[in-house]
Image (cartoon, coloured by chain):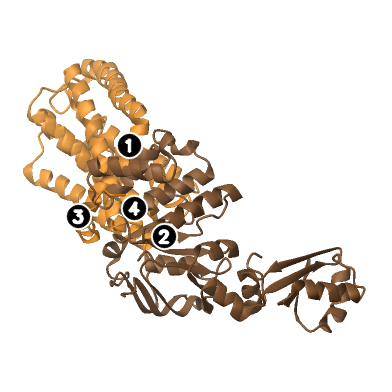
Chain colours: A brown, B orange
Amino acid sequence: MNRVIEARGLRKTYGELAAVDGIDFAVEPGESFGLLGPNGAGKSTTMRMIGGTLDRTGGDLRVAGLDPGREGPRVRAHLGVVPQQDNLDEELRVAENLVMYGRYFGLPRRHLTAKAAELLDFVELSAKARDKVSSLSGGMKRRLTIARALVNDPSILLLDEPTTGLDPQARHTLWDRLFRLKETGTTLVLTTHFMDEAEQLCDRLIVIDSGVIMAQGSPRDLIREHSTREVLELRFGSRRNAEVVDELVEMDCRLEVLPDRVLLYADDGEEVLGEVHRRGLAPVTSLVRRSSLEDVFLRLTGRSLVD
Amino acid sequence: MTRVTPSPERSAERARRLGWWYAAESQLRSMRAYLGAITLSAALEPLLYLLAMGVGLGTLVDAQNGPVDGVDYLVFVAPALLVASVVMSVGTEMTYPVMDGFKWHRLYYAPAATAVTPQQVATGHFVAAMIRFTVQALVFYLVMLAFGAVTLGASILVVPAAVLAAAAAGAPLQAFAATRQDEGGAFVFVQRFVVMPMFLFSGTFFPLASMPLWLQWVGWVSPVWHGSQLARLAAYGAPVPGWLVAVHVLVLAALAVTGIHASRRVYARRLAA
C-alpha cells in the first residue's frame, strides 16, 4: 500500500534551536497515527510542515505523494486541518462557516449547502445551524471545527491537540466522532499531550521529546516494551516520600519518585503493595493501575508529560 | 456522506485560479454583519459633507470669490470630497481587520490551511475592501447627483478615480498592518498623522496651488490629491493637461501595485514560513 505521509530526516531549525531534529515516520492509509509529547516537543511544527504552512529546514517529506514545501495548495486539497486554536469566523453563522470554508476548495455553493447540513448532522450541531458561532460552547466549537475540516472530504485529517481545554464529556463526544471517521477510512494524524487520548485513538504513535523520536509503535507495544503490566502508586505525604525511598529501593522493582507520589513498576501491583505493608511502610493512599503511555514517557525521558 | 465531492486535484486547480476571489468572498460575507452601519455611513457621510462644505461653505465662497477652478464651489469640492471620504475609509478596512486576521481571531489561518495560498489571502482582503469602496463611492455619487453637484454621464468616472486612490492608499497600509505583531498605537498614529493630513492638505477644499509651496508636497505624494484631480476631470472637465492625467494614474497605480506586492510577501512570510 502507498504511504499517505512519509518523512525522512525531517528537520526544522530556528537559528541554533532544532524544533524538529531529523525524524523519520510513515503513515499508512486509513491509519490513526499519533504524535505524543509534551508542549514544545515539536509536534505542531511537524503538523505545519505536513500541511505545507511551514517550510522545513531539511529532510524529505511526502504527503499524498507530493512535496508540501513546493506544492502546498495541492497537498492541502487532500487534507482537513483542525488547528490547535479555533479560528472560526464568529461574524458568520454556524452553517455559513462550513459553506465559506468549502469555497476555499473551489466547491460550488449548492454542493456546500447540502454538505454543510450533512456535516452538522454528523457532529450533532444541526439544531445550531443558524446560530452565531459566538453562542457555541467550547466543545461545540471544536466539533464545528472538525466538521469544517471535513467539508472537502479529505483523505487525511490533521488534528492538532483536538481536545485541549474540553471537559471530559465533550472529549468523549469528540472521540466518538473521530472513531466514526476512522471507520469510514479517513486517515487521522493527531498530536496530543494526553496519554489517554493517544491510547484511545491511535493505532500507532511516535513519542517525541525535544524534536526527536524517543519511541514508536502501537500503544500496547510501547507499554509492553517500556513499562511493566501494572503500576503501584503510593503517597506517603510530601515529607515522608523521600524518607521511604531508601527502603523501597531494596524491593526488586523499578522506582520513580515524583514530587507528590512514588511509582513502583511491577507485573503484579497487588503483590508489591502487600510487600510494602509487610515492611510496615503504611502509605497514606495506594493505587494499583495498569501501565499507561504516561509511564512510557516517564521511562523514556525521566519527565512527566504534563508538567 | 454519499455526496460526491470534486477531486482534490480539481479543487487545487480551481483554487489556483480563483483562490483570491474565495478569500474576498469570505471577507465580504463577514462585512455583512456590519452592513447596516456601512450603508448608513456611506449614505450619511456624503450628505453631511456636501451640506457643510458644498452648500454651507460654498455659499460663502461663491459670494466672496466667485467661481473656483471655473465652477461653483459645490461642483469643485464634491468630487474631491468623494475621493477623500473613500480614501479615509482605508483607515478602517486596512488596519484592524488585518490585525484580526493575523492575531485576534486568526481568521487568515483558516484559508491558509486550505488549497488557497497566503498570497491569495492578501489579494482577497484587498479586493473585498475595493468592492466595499466601490459601493461607497457609488452611493456618494448618487448623493452628488441629488445635490446637483454633477450631471449624470461620464462623470460616473469619479467612482473608479476614487477607488484607484483608495487602492493607492490602502495597499501600502495593508502591507504595513500585516507587519505589525500588535496594534500598539500604530494605527492611531497612521490615522492622525498620515490619513488626516492627506485629507486636509491634498487640495480637497481649495486648489493645491493656493497653498504655500513648502506645503504643496503633501499633495504631490498624496493619493487623495491625484485621485481628486482625476475625479474633478471626470466630474466637470477640470483643466488638467494630458501628461498630468497620465502622472496621476501612474502614481496611483504604482502605489497600489507596490503595496499589493508587499502585502503578498508579508502574508506569505507570516502564514507559511
Does B226 sit left or right of B214 as displayed?
Answer: left
Q: Give me the residue at 25% from left, 59% from top.
A: B8
Q: Secondary structure at mark 4?
A: helix
Q: Name the residue carrying label 1.
A: B88
Q: Position of residue A217 (x, y in %)?
A: 51, 76
Q: Are marks 3 and 2 on the same chain?
A: no
Name the one closer to the observer, A172 or B40.
A172
Q: Position of residue B250 (x, y in %)?
A: 15, 50
> Cα distance, mark 1 to mark 3?
35 Å
Residue type of the residue flagged with mark 3: Arg
**Which of the labelled discs sits on residue B14, or is there none?**
3
Q: Secondary structure at mark 3?
A: helix
Of marks 3 and 4, the one in the foreground: 3
Q: Name the residue carrying label 2.
A: A182
Q: Position of residue B36 (x, y in %)?
A: 35, 26
Write down the chain letter for disc 3.
B
Write down the chain letter for disc 1.
B
Write down the chain letter for disc 4.
B
Write down the chain letter for disc 2.
A
Residue type of the residue flagged with mark 4: Pro
CB within 8 Å, label 1 to label 3: no
Label whose residue precedes the other's in the sequence (1 or 3): 3
Does residue B86 appear in this view? yes
Q: Are marks 1 and 2 on the same chain?
A: no
**Which of the labelled discs sits on residue B111, or is there none?**
4
**Which of the labelled discs sits on residue B31, or is there none?**
none
Label whose residue precedes the other's in the sequence (3 or 4): 3
Q: Residues within 10 Å of mark 2 (few under 14, many from 20)?
A: some
Q: Secondary structure at mark 1?
A: helix
CB within 8 Å, label 4 to label 1: no
Residue type of the residue flagged with mark 2: Lys
Of marks 3 and 2, the one in the foreground: 2
